[in-house]
Structures are given as C-alpha cells and as structure tokens.
Amino acid sequence: MSAVAEFLPLPSRPVASPARPKRLGRVLLDIGAVAPHHLLRAVAMEPRLDATLADILLAEGWVTETDLLVAQSRAWRAPLADLDTNAPCPLTVRALGIEFCLAEGIVPLAGRDGRILLATARPERFADIAPRLDLGAVEMALIAPSTAEAAILSVAAEAMAQRAEMRTPEPLSCRGFDGVGRRALILLAGLVLALIVAALAWPGPALASFLVWTTGIIALQAGLKVLALTAAAKAPPRRADAGAAGRGRLPRVSVLIALRHEPEIAPRLIARLDRLDYPRALLDVLLITEADDAATRAALTDATLPGWMRQVTVPPGTIRTKPRALNYALPLAKGRIVGVYDAEDAPAPDQIRQVVARFRDAPPQVACVQCALDYYHPRTNWLSRCFTAEYAGWFRVVLPGLARLGLVVPLGGTSVFLRRGPLERLGAWDAHNVTEDADLGLRLARAGFRTEVIDSVTEEEPNCRFLPWVRQRSRWLKGYAMTWRVHMRDPVRLWRDLGAWRFFGVQLLFLGTLSQFLLAPLLWLTWLAGPGGMAGLAGLAPPILLYIVAAAIDIAVTAWAVRGPRHRHLWPWLPTLILYFPLATLAAWKGVAELARKPFYWDKTRHGVIDAAAPRVTPP
C-alpha cells in the first residue's frame, strides 16, 4: 500500500488538530523521504532564515512535495484534503480575503453536508489562525502549496485580474486617459505643432518665446546634470556589505518577471537566476506569462523549474501591460521584499544580499532600492555603444545624484526592489501607465518614502536596432507624458506633497524632457536658417555657445560614468552622442501621436536578438 493511500478520509464532524505534532524531520526520516545529511543541513539553516523546515527542504529539492505531504499528515495526524469531494468555496475565499488565503496557504472547502473545512499548506500556523477566522469549529486538512494556490486561483483568478487593472487609486492612475487627461495632452501636442508651423510662416514673438523656453530647459537640465555629477562624485552609490545581510534572520524575497512572446529567453533566464547567491528557501521567483502566450508557457514547462521558481498565468483583460501582470502576481508573492527583473537580465550574484543588507541598515522611510543597469555585448554596433554609454550616465550619475539631492527618483523598470508594505499601501503599479516604474517612483516620493541607488549591477541586452529603439523610447516618453499629466491634475496638492524643490525637479524631469525633444526641430531650424534667415530675431536667437556647453556637459557626465576599465572603450564614441540623442525626437512625436489612438498600448521590446549567453557579472 502506498503512503498516499494511508490517508484517512475527512471525518463527518469537526475535530481539533493536535497541539503537539510529532517532529516533522523525524517523520521524514522514518518514511525515507529525506537523506539524513540534507535534513541536518536544513535544521542548521532554519534559525537563520525566515522559512520553515518544510520551505527549506522543498526549495533545495531535498524532498518532494508528495513525500512532504505524507510526512506532514503523520506529524500533525491530519487527513489530506480531497478536492474532488470538497471543492473550494468561492464565497468563503472572498469573505476571508483572497490575498489572506494566498498568504496563509488556506483553502476553505465546501463539504457535502454544508460545513466549511479548512485545507492548509502551513499546518504549523493553523492553530494560531483558525480561531481568528470566525468560522466556528473547523478541521485542519492538509494540501500541498502548489495545489493550494491553484485551488484559490480556480475561484479567484477573474477577481484578481480585475483588481490588477484597478489597484492604483483613481486620482493617481492614468486609466481615465480616454477622457479629459488624454484630450488635454493631445491638445497640448497639437498646440505645439501649430506654433512651430506658425513660427515658420511668421517668425516673431511666438517663435522667440519658444526659443527662450527651449534654451532655458536645456540650460536648466545641463545645470541639473552638473549638480547630479557633483553629488554622485562626492558620495557615489554605496556598495552594501552583502555579508551584513546575514545578521539575524534573512527575509524572503520575491522576484517578479513578466515575459511575453519570449520562449527562447526562458532557458537562459533560469540559468542566470540560478547564479544568485541567496538561500533558495528565501527566493520566490514568479515567471509571469499571459494566457494567450502558449509558446512561452510551454518553454517554461519544458525547462523543469526548480522549487523556488514557478509560473503564473495572467487571465485576459481589457489591457495587456507589464504593470497589470505585476499586479496580478503580487498577491501570489511570498516575500517581504518584492523585486522586478526583465526577461533578459543577468543580475550580479550577490545582488539580493546587497539589497537585503541595505534595507536592514536603512530607516523605514527607504522603501525602494534601485540597482544599476548595464549592458552585455555593448560592442555590437554604434547604437549599442551609445545605449550603453547613455545608461551608464543615467544609472551611475543622474539617478544617484537625484537621490543625493533629495529629488524624485524615476525608477528603472528592472532591478528595483521594494518593501512590500509601502508598495501595497500605494496601490502597487498603475496597470494603465506604460512607464509604471517612473510613476511609482513619483508616488513613493509623494507618500514620504525615499529611494536609494546602490552599486550593484544587472546586465541586460542592449536595444541595438533602430526601429525597435525608437519604439521602446516612444513608449517611455509617452509614459512620461501620462505620468506628468496624472500628477498635475492637482498641482497645489503635488506641491504640498513634494515641496518646492522636488516639485521643480518633477517639472524639469518630466515636462522639461518632453518639451526638449518635442521642440528640438525648432532649434534645428534656427541653426539651418541662421540669423540672416530669421529676420528680426538675430538678437533673440540662442547663442550657439549654449548648445556647445550643454553637449559638453552631457559628454563629460557620460565620460565620468564610463571611466572604469570595463567601459573605457566607449570614450572614442562619446562625441557621437550628439547624433544619438536627436533620435529621441522621433520617439517623442511617435509617443505623443500614439496618445491620440491607443494610450495604453504597450510597444513590446523583443529580447534575445543578440543570441549569446551573458557572461557572469563582475561589478566594475
């Protein structure tokens, strides 16, 4: 007779679970489910980890889920839940709370006699939780963690999908962009275009005022970069002591990775994540796929995921964006710290230890830790070299400088880690915002939280093709426009939330960046026409010296960022950035035009174009 066949059927009336179960480890040894040396290692690890013995054994692959269930049944003298006889009860799941049931591994079951039975994947917590559920006398039945999650999703997936789209509060979400906000941005873009046309036909005060505005923005942004470089040079991003993360009990960290149409990425992604130097019992990696993406889901299934990775499938909805997928998966995450990676990422092996160490040493106001992004294979072509140099300046100078200056830090879309409590209180990610990362950084700042940038590197694949580069950048700039409009619904409230200094920084970062790229053609025309062709405006035309200085500052900031031995080969290419940055003007106008037709469209960037595995990351 198999061990599974030894389970007793659920009794017809509730009984109390034993207060003193037999030790789980002893039972596992008795039934031959675990090797003695593996059990000893797990027992030694348990006091240092925020995980149970069962969690450790499963994550490390030292016991199977079936054998663990057998041992738990004997240790707690509890039966297995029979989902064929007792189905999950949707009403009770909603009454207890979907997220509560998922977090506690509890599945309310509807018995045939009308009573409620409670299946649990965490029997060690049952005695504490059951009395607080106001369900009367209940019986504990056992269920495997993966089965418990699947059972809850079978009755709650649709509700979770709807909540994923509406999780961010309405005043701070751009989901109403089909209304006033969207029309306002379209009107603004049309006005800018009309003024450019008018300026060409009738050069005069309007043209002069826009030249002053544009040159002013360029001057202010150049000044901000100087301040950011000064701040970053005086106090560069700290490299947290990864060894310090081991003080006390290590927390569980969940990592959310949204994949779409990326079957070829799956094997490389799993291999790269396997390099992470963090206890497997405390790693909770969720690979998030869409219901209609059969190819990616099949690739993950064929890859045989380790116990600390699992696949999550997002049901169809009214939109299909990365933040919606992240919101859907968040209730399934088990960690107190939640991170986000992209499908092509190769994080530094000690990155999560560094993040944990920084959160441990930081005050509670530090709700977010942003790691630096870098690129593998930067020598692929000119575009990949410029992309690598640009990101080095952004993540090694601008973002650390903004943090040091006390300004809002627009987050990157990957290698960002958040304390779960603040993330959930803020409504997680705005499912309708196509730059959910920058928006979340602004919402964190408005709520009084801080973001820190640490010196831990994640390598990505560079976007090295022209049209995909423009499409990706257009999505980012479209999202900047959406984010600015959402938070400027009530400028007075935004001023009060941020203060004058950070309010000014938001205007310069979001509105300034947009207007600089949208109005760039106006500046190009003044250069082409010259003072003689701009009759009456010779005295108002911006001096060429300003552009030379601004370009020199951009190059100097980037040169400082790529001064290390791994990036010094980019120095000869830095002068060509004056040809690279104007490409964003095409992207800006594409993004604004897209606001009129499909504001929530996610222009997906294809990964895996550079068909080579990333090398092991060695921080510079």
Image: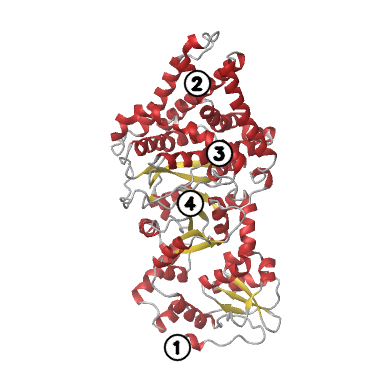
SS class of the residue under badge 4? strand
Check residue 340 in the rendering and tell me which mark sits there, or answer none: 4
Q: Disc 3, disc 2: CB below 8 Å?
A: no
SS class of the residue under badge 3? helix
209 left or right of 563? right
Amino acid type of the residue tagged 2 in the rendering: Leu
Mark 4 neighbour class, 10 Å CA radius: few under 14, some 14 to 19, many 20 or more? many
Residue 149 in view (yes/no): yes
The image position of residue 327, as x and y in percent, is 57, 55
Q: Disc 4, disc 1: CB below 8 Å?
A: no
Check residue 484 in the rendering and tell me which mark sits there, or answer none: none
- N-term-proximal mark, 2 vs 1: 1
- N-term-proximal mark, 4 vs 1: 1
Amino acid type of the residue tagged 3 in the rendering: Lys
Query: Which residue matches tag 1?
Result: 2
Colour scheme of this structure image? Answer: secondary structure
Query: Which residue matches tag 3?
Result: 478
Query: Residue visible at 40% across and 27% down?
Result: 578
Query: Which residue matches tag 2?
Result: 523
- N-term-proximal mark, 3 vs 2: 3
Amino acid type of the residue tagged 4 in the rendering: Val
Nearest to viewer (mark 2 / mark 4): 2
Mark 1 neighbour class, 10 Å CA radius: few under 14, some 14 to 19, many 20 or more? few
Query: Residue visible at 62% across and 48% down?
Result: 426
The image position of residue 51, as x and y in percent, is 48, 65
Query: Residue visible at 47% across and 21% down?
Result: 524
Q: Disc 1, disc 3: CB below 8 Å?
A: no
Residue 410 in view (yes/no): no
Outermost residue toward the front?
201
